[in-house]
Image (cartoon, helix red, strand yellow):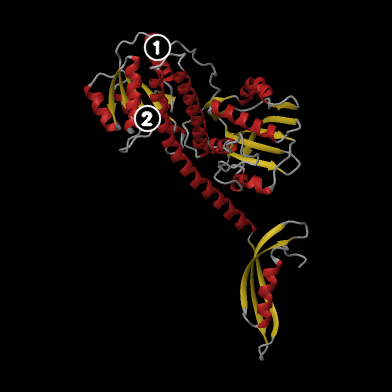
């Protein structure tokens, strides 16, 4: 009784009573013990009784196996399988929902053109479009959790990125919260999508803010971390190597073990239902895993929390963060031909209508194979393709073939979904740029304008 956990003591005694009473002569029982140091261990007890010639109980012998490590591994496996299953479900739903949103927003824009800007109907339509865009944000978080968002990774300096966000963070957090930056001087470059890293920092900062309703201290730290093979074994689905750590910590209310266990589950929130989707931290988890890193938590109730994000070290110098200046979309369309490759007929139809409304000539294909046939027979200036296509050849492979056979054709991807959860599926190595679904007509016009402007510059 002194060394058995109170919850496990009754079942242990019940089995022993049966053994002594002769109902059974042996049993196997899983139970937990308290060690002298206070540690809890899991055990498997194999117990066998000895009786005299008259069948009277004499003694019992037990072999006790420490299965703590096995139970820990089993728990990690169950958690990984649960996250994978939920990720598959949410990824598939988000992908289909993104296509629905693309159809809705495209048709709403055409409907809005029928009314003047002063018309009440136009205002109502724009409010619906704004709601659709909020829905798009939710789907992007679902895709991030399921590791199926399309990433655009590059070598980045997280210190510089944090410095650039400092003003935004101070504006976002209440006055009673003090922000401290502790960035490593010799920090390595890391390989990640800079826009998603910014989103991670903002999500974690807001989470810390909510954990400190009366104010407090928020600290953002960076460091170089080398994960040994021994350490990697303790972490699910992580390889040994060099990482850059990003730690956001606070001295807020902290987390109970139950909250920590479910913290990265999509739609889980302990903040109440109003204003919280429960997708912020699940997005952080999915992004880190998809980027080849991992996330860990250090928190206790009443003692604050630290969320630690580890991203893989980059093998090349930091890429320039300078972005191309946004130009005004061209008003003079020269009748360029655009080949739209999209398997969803409704998405393909609305995209074709948007392009024709802008003044472009449009060809259509449902699969990559059909697209290659069209390219072989027709003059095409730009290939606008979904990344995920049926028939065994995706947008990435189509772009590779197009670049090889028709190097003058510009390539633009439209997607919000990566089928295998890998960065390479975006196909940017084949000369394409990305237009995130669902998109507005003005965004489509801007991307195409930028691509054709590059041609004129060269």
Give residue 157's position: percent from left, percent from top: 60, 24
**Quarter in which the C terminus is drawn:** top left
Task: Please tell me which residue is depicted at 72% across the width and 41% down the height of the picture.
Answer: 254
Task: Please tell me which residue is depicted at 33% across the width and 11% down the height of the picture.
Answer: 333
Out of 42 and 225, give the one closest to the viewer.
42
Give residue 81's position: percent from left, percent from top: 51, 50
Farthest bottom residue?
A: 54
Out of 313 and 214, give the one closest to the viewer.
214
Q: Quadrant of residue 249?
A: top right
Q: Secondary structure at mark 1?
A: helix
Give residue 67's position: percent from left, percent from top: 63, 61
**Quarter in which the N terminus is drawn:** bottom right
Q: CA distance from mark 1 to mark 2?
A: 22 Å
Farthest left residue?
A: 377
Q: Crowding near pointer 2: few (<14 within 10 Å), some, many (20+)?
A: many
Disc 2 target residue: 386
| Lateral position of residue 451 relative to residue 244, left or right | left
Give residue 313's position: percent from left, percent from top: 57, 32
Q: Quadrant of residue 220?
A: top right
Q: Secondary structure at mark 2?
A: strand
Disc 1 target residue: 453
* Residue 418 visible in the current orientation: no
Out of 186 and 178, give the one closest to the viewer.
178
| Lateral position of residue 276 relative to residue 116, left or right | right
Q: Quadrant of residue 308?
A: top right
Circles 1, 2 touching at the beta carbon (< 8 Å): no
Q: Which mark is residue 9?
A: none
């Amino acid at each position: 009784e002194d060394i058995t956990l109170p919850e496990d003591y009754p079942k242990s005694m019940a089995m022993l009573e049966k053994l002594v009473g002769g109902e059974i002569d042996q049993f196997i029982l899983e139970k937990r013990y308290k060690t002298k140091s206070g540690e809890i261990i899991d055990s498997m007890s194999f117990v066998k009784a000895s009786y005299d010639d008259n069948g009277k109980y004499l003694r019992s012998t037990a072999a006790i196996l420490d299965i703590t490590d096995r139970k820990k591994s089993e728990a990690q496996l169950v958690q990984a399988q649960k996250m994978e299953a939920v990720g598959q479900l949410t990824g598939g739903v988000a992908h289909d929902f993104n296509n629905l949103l693309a159809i809705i927003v495209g048709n709403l824009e055409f409907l809005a053109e029928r009314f003047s800007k002063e018309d009440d109907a136009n205002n109502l339509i724009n409010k619906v479009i704004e709601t659709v865009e909020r829905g798009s944000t939710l789907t992007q978080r679902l895709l991030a959790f399921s590791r199926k968002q399309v990433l655009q990774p590059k070598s980045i300096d997280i210190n510089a990125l944090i410095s650039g966000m400092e003003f935004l963070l101070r504006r976002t957090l209440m006055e009673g919260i003090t922000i401290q930056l502790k960035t490593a001087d010799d920090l390595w470059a890391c390989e990640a999508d800079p826009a998603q890293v910014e989103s991670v920092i903002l999500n974690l900062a807001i989470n810390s803010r909510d954990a400190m309703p009366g104010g407090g201290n928020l600290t953002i730290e960076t460091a170089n971390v080398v994960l040994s093979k021994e350490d990697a074994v303790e972490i699910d689905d992580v390889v040994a190597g060099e990482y850059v750590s990003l730690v956001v910590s606070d001295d807020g209310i902290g987390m109970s073990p139950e909250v920590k266990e479910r913290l990265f589950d999509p739609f889980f929130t302990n903040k109440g239902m109003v204003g919280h989707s429960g997708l912020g931290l699940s997005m952080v988890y999915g992004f880190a895993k998809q980027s080849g890193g991992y996330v860990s938590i250090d928190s206790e109730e009443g003692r604050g929390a630290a969320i630690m994000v580890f991203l893989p070290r980059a093998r090349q110098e930091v890429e320039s963060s300078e972005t191309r200046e946004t130009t005004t979309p061209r008003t003079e369309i020269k009748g360029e031909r655009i080949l739209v490759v999209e398997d969803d007929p409704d998405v393909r139809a609305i995209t074709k209508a948007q392009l024709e409304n802008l003044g472009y000539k449009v060809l259509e294909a449902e699969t990559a194979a059909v697209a290659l046939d069209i390219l072989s027979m027709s003059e095409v200036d730009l290939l606008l393709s979904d990344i995920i296509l049926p028939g065994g050849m995706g947008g990435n492979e189509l772009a590779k073939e197009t670049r090889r056979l028709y190097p003058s054709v510009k390539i633009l991807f439209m997607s919000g979904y990566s089928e295998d959860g890998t960065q390479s599926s975006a196909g940017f190595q084949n000369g394409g740029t990305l237009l995130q679904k669902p998109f507005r007509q003005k965004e489509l016009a801007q991307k195409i304008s930028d691509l054709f402007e590059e041609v004129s510059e060269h």
